[in-house]
Structure formats: structure tokens, C-alpha cells
Image (cartoon, rainbow, N blue to C red):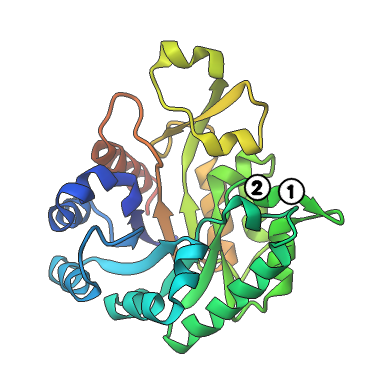
Amino acid sequence: MAFSVALHVYSVRDYAERDLKATLQKIKEIGYDGVEFAGLYGHTPAEVRNMTGEIGLVPISAHVPLEEMLANPEQIIAGYAEIGCSYMAITHLSEERRPGTDRFDQTIKDIEMLSTIAQKHGIQMLYHNHTFEFQKINGEYALDVLYQSIPSELLQTQIDTCWVHVAGEDPAEYIRKYIDRAPVVHLKDFVMYNAQEENQMHEPVEAESNEAVNSKEAVSFRPLGYGEQNFPAILTAAEEAGAEWVIVAQDRPSMGKTSMECADISRKYLKNLGI
């Protein structure tokens, strides 16, 4: 498998908030090829471009919420183009824009409009799923409706393997569903546990999980290889789908480790798999 491996900077945001450049240097040191941004931590696009260039990290992509992008599409997309991002991923929909609401059709139109602007700037737009997109519309998942509604040359997938699994689907099979439309795949591990155990575990509960699973259950994120995911199968599917990048993400640290220690564990796990 010949993937390049990036880290979602949001995973180590507590470090990035204090010192972005030092954080990027550490990400490089522990073996990542690139990074995916989720905000610039007070820096200009030019400053971030210079940081990644000096350190030797590829600024492969960026997560931007839909409403933030719609507020000033040209400026925001141009800024990530200046950094050198090849991809941007729409990563959050406000509740009034989600499947099952009157505004979901408009959401699809807005995503197509933004994807067209991104294309003009040399950026491929992606959509990053959570769990709410697995609500069905006329018998089909809303996520599939979105991809069916917008041409693949404008919008491609960034499948978050954690949320696909939590929603009840096999991540590997879901990636295969989008062969040649899955250039970037999010790798995220987790365990499910009963929320009544939370006080004993002293770990955070991820609110997103409550949209897809019984309210008595919760998700606890893990470094890769320490949760429920079958990553050999997921990586094989990603290779078959034509993915060029895999992005490690861990929304919150766990196991008594810092966020950077978790990122290091995940990178070592992938190296042991030959990636």
C-alpha cells in the first residue's frame, strides 16, 4: 500500500492553540507526511504556507464548516489555495440544514456552488460525514443522496470510518461503494461503552454518537489499533478505491495519553502495517 499519511491537526488542537509551528514540527518528527487543518490558529494563509514548507509537511486539506464557507466563499477558499491545500472538506452542517429538514435541498445546492468555486481555485471539494447523514430519504441514506445529486468531478468523498461504523455500516464496504471517488479517507478508532460507566472510566463522551446509537451508549475515541476498527480491511478497501491519502484523526485523547502521544501511537501502528 502506497498511501501518504496525514494528521488532522484538530486531533492535537490543544498543542496547536499554544504554538502551531512547534506542533507542526512535532507532527513531522513522529512520521506524518502531511496535515489537514481545521482553522489556522490566528495565522495568515501565507504564514501557514511558510511553516509547512519550512518543516516539510504537505498541507493536503482543510476542514471548514458549511456556514463558515458560505459567509465568504471566494476569500476562504482562496486562502486555503494560498496555503497549498489540494482538498477542502465540508465538515459540519447546522441542525437546520441536515437531512430531514426543509433546508437540506438548499444545502445540496450550496455545496455544489462551493465545489464549483473551489474547482476554479484548483481545490477539490470533499464532504466529511458524521452519523446524521445516515438518515434515510426515500429508502436511501442522505449521504448517498448528496453524492448522487452533485457530479463526482465537483464533490468527492472523505469517508470518516468511525462514524460509518457507529452508524451501523461496514467502513470497508462503504469505501468500496465510492471507488474512484475516495481520494482521502479518515482513519479513526473507537470503542463503544455504556454511558453509565462514564464516571468510572473518566473519559469524555462524544455527543455525535447519540445521533446514531442508543442514548445509553457512547463513543470513546482511541489511537489506531486500540479500538473496534478493522484497519487492514479498511486500508485494503481504500487502496481499491484509489485513495492517495489517509488521515489519522482522534477527536479526543484517551487511555491516559496526551493528544500528541495518541497521534504518535497511531502513526506507529500504521508503520507496523507497512504504511
Q: Residues within 10 Å of mark 1 (few under 14, many from 20)?
A: some
* Residue designated by label 2: 132
Residue 35 locus on image (x, y percent) = 31, 60
Residue 158 locus on image (x, y percent) = 53, 61
Residue 2 in view of the camera: no
The answer to which image quadrant residue 152 occupies is bottom right
Up-down relation of residue 150 to residue 23 (above or below): below
Residue 185 locus on image (x, y percent) = 50, 58
Q: Label for residue 33? A: none
Q: Label for residue 135? A: 1
The answer to which image quadrant residue 21 occupies is bottom left
Residue extending farthest top: 200
Residue depicted at 28% across the width and 69% down the height: 58
Looking at the rendered structure, the kind of residue marked 2 is: Phe
Residue depicted at 43% across the width and 58% down the height: 246
On screen, residue 106 versus residue 93, left or right, reads right
